[in-house]
Amino acid sequence: MIAVFILIPVVSFALFIFACYKTDWKAIDEQNQQFYVDGYHIYYDRKILRQKEVEQLKSKLE
């Protein structure tokens, strides 16, 4: 029974390391970049992006 308690974390850690090794981090980063504009996330920072857009429009009108 004690062996099971020791074996479960060891196997879990090995699977975690294997998953991290197989992950293509560059492809994930490239895919995530399509959601960012000037360092702001399109969804989460939409209020900030909208405010910047309004400021740009105001500056063009002046």
Image: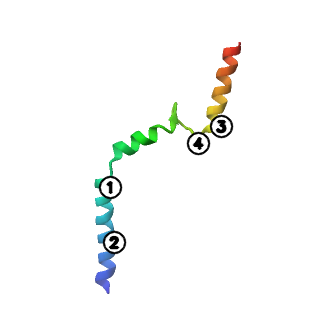
Question: Badge 3 is on which residue?
Answer: 47
- Does residue 9 sit above or below 36 in this rendering? below
Mark 4 touches mark 2? (CB < 8 Å): no
Q: Earlier in the sequence, mark 2 or mark 3?
A: 2
Q: Amino acid at mark 2?
A: Pro
SS state under label 3: helix
Image x and y of residue 55, in percent = 67, 23
Q: Secondary structure at mark 2?
A: helix
Q: Which residue is mark 2?
A: 9
Neighbours of disc 1 within 10 Å: few (<14), some (14-19), many (20+): few
Place residue 28 in its image quadrant: top left
* Residue 41: x %, y % from top left: 54, 39
**What is the spatial separation of the Cα atoms under label 4 and label 3, in whole angstroms?**
9 Å
CA distance separating discs 3 and 1: 34 Å
- The C terminus - image quarter: top right
Q: Earlier in the sequence, mark 3 or mark 1?
A: 1
Query: Residue lying furthest top in this view?
Result: 62
Q: Mark 4 vs mark 3: give the one in front.
A: 4
Q: Pick whichever of labels 2 and 1 is earlier in the sequence.
A: 2
Q: Position of residue 37 (x, y in %)?
A: 52, 32
Kindly identify the residue that appears in the image at 33 percent across and 52 percent down.
Answer: 23
Marks 1 and 4: CB-CB under 8 Å?
A: no
- Residue at the spot of label 1: 20
Q: Nearer the viewer, mark 1 or mark 4?
A: 4
Q: For mark 4, what is the residue?
A: 43
Q: Amino acid at mark 3?
A: Lys
Q: Residue at x 32, y 58 (%)?
A: 19
* Residue at (45% x, 38% y) in the render: 33
